[in-house]
Image: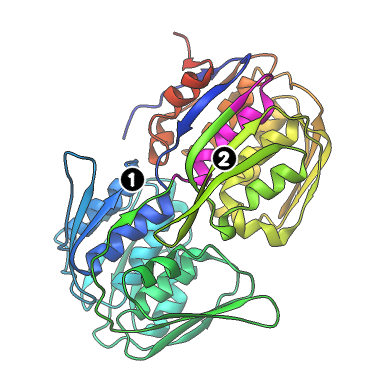
Amino acid sequence: MAKPRALISESTRALRGMVAVPGDKSISHRALMLGSLAIGETRVRGLLEGEDVLATAAAMRALGAQVGRHVDGTWRVSGLGVGGLAEPKGVLDMGNSGTAARLLIGILAAHPFTAFLTGDASLCARPMERVMEPLRQIGASFVARTGGRLPLAVTGTASPIPIEYALPVPSAQVKSAVLFAGLGAPGRTTVIEREPTRDHSELMLRHFGADVAVERLNHGGRAISIVGQPELACRDVEVPGDISSAAFPLVAALLVPDSRVTIRNVGINPLRAGLVETLRDMGGVVEVVNRRDQGGEPIADLVASTSALRGVDVPPERAPSMIDEYPIVAVAAALARGPTRLFGLTELRVKESDRLAAIARGLTSAGVRVEEGKDSLVIHGLGGAPKGGATIRVDLDHRIAMAFLVLGMVSRAPTTIDDATPIDTSFPGFVDLMNGLGGRLGEAGA
């Protein structure tokens, strides 16, 4: 494990420039996994080369697929076909990635061997029972720590059963795990969600040739079904920039005086675009330009300029479309005029850290008044710069780390985070990118 590395962020005068952020993490995981289940060689450009995705690449190699990076930056995956993965010789270490772990458990559920999965301290504290429950219905069995936590053993079935499963809570990860397991089952496997969640799995499954149907239901939800045992064909994948990573320079540009920043080639999937909608509700000047389509995913350039933000109420039904962006939205709310009320935040309790508690604790230490509820947060915006001066405990959470480094850029006194090493799980090069725009991030004590 890397030695903790403290970083300090100081007040910034202006941010200017045009940048590209790393590839979308959700799409990167899925490209490697589905490429490993396809026949032939899949080429992936723009893959996020962060620690989370590299852990997925290592896991797929351990399961028999050929996965490697070529000198031109393209990743190539030679797949084994649906049901063709091999029993791994060792434990699959998924690092910090809940997405990778849950989706891979779904794939393994339809393979007739036993595999062992583990992860870092943060991942081993996250619940997996929500994935295991429907996969038991398909025929898999599990041995796990108390509460369904890693390390765990998954024994897949040679005869997967197609099921219909209604998600108890909105979760793209659980939906994807069931659909991926359904690839190995004869007949149609269906997932019913009462609130639409990000649909990267559906889009990419179709891209690789799977028969996926989506039916809109009367109550606003969706029924997603897949016909099992297809022959997936290799495909080229262009990974767009991750909107969850773009969120940090985007919000920083809204908050730092005299700023204008363009972020190129960002994925703007409607089921991931709640951030842009919320920032615009707050009065943020965010332009979406140069819209186009790339491999079934909509992309665009985002242009953000310094804005006077106001507090808003963010409804719970928006949570699935911006669940990873709440830490940085909370930073924006801290500088807005008036209170911002965020609802439907239960899922933040079981992310890389208890993000709801981490946001509340960090903002309070920076001089911002907050009210933390069980699944809500009220942030009393200051209408200007907070006092700052705090040292933030990030608890191995990359998004908490980056959000509070942005807060330091607009605080009266510098903000320090106790450990910047988790940032590399999703945004390698974050510090250099922010400093290239005009930021003042550096090693604490340097």
Residue 214 numbered mark, or none: none
Residue at image location 66% in from the left, 22% down from the top: 256
Task: Based on the picture, tell me whether residue 243 belongs to the magenta stretch.
Answer: yes
Q: Which residues are magenta?
A: 241-260
Residue on which the image places disc 2? 302
> Could you say which quadrant of the image residue 71 lies in?
top left
Badge 2 marks a residue whose secondary structure is: strand
Q: Residue 36: percent from the left, percent from the top?
A: 23, 64
Q: Main secondary structure of the magenta part?
A: helix
Do we see residue 263 in this rendering? yes
Badge 1 marks a residue whose secondary structure is: loop
> Could you say which quadrant of the image residue 27 lies in?
bottom left
Residue on which the image places disc 1? 46
Q: CA distance from mark 1 to mark 2?
A: 18 Å
Taking depth in this image into account, of 217 and 165 the one nearest to the observer is 217
In the depicted structure, whether residue 69 falls above or below residue 428: below
Q: Residues within 10 Å of mark 1 (few under 14, many from 20)?
A: some
Residue at image location 39% in from the left, 60% down from the top: 295
In the depicted structure, whether residue 91 falls above or below residue 311: below
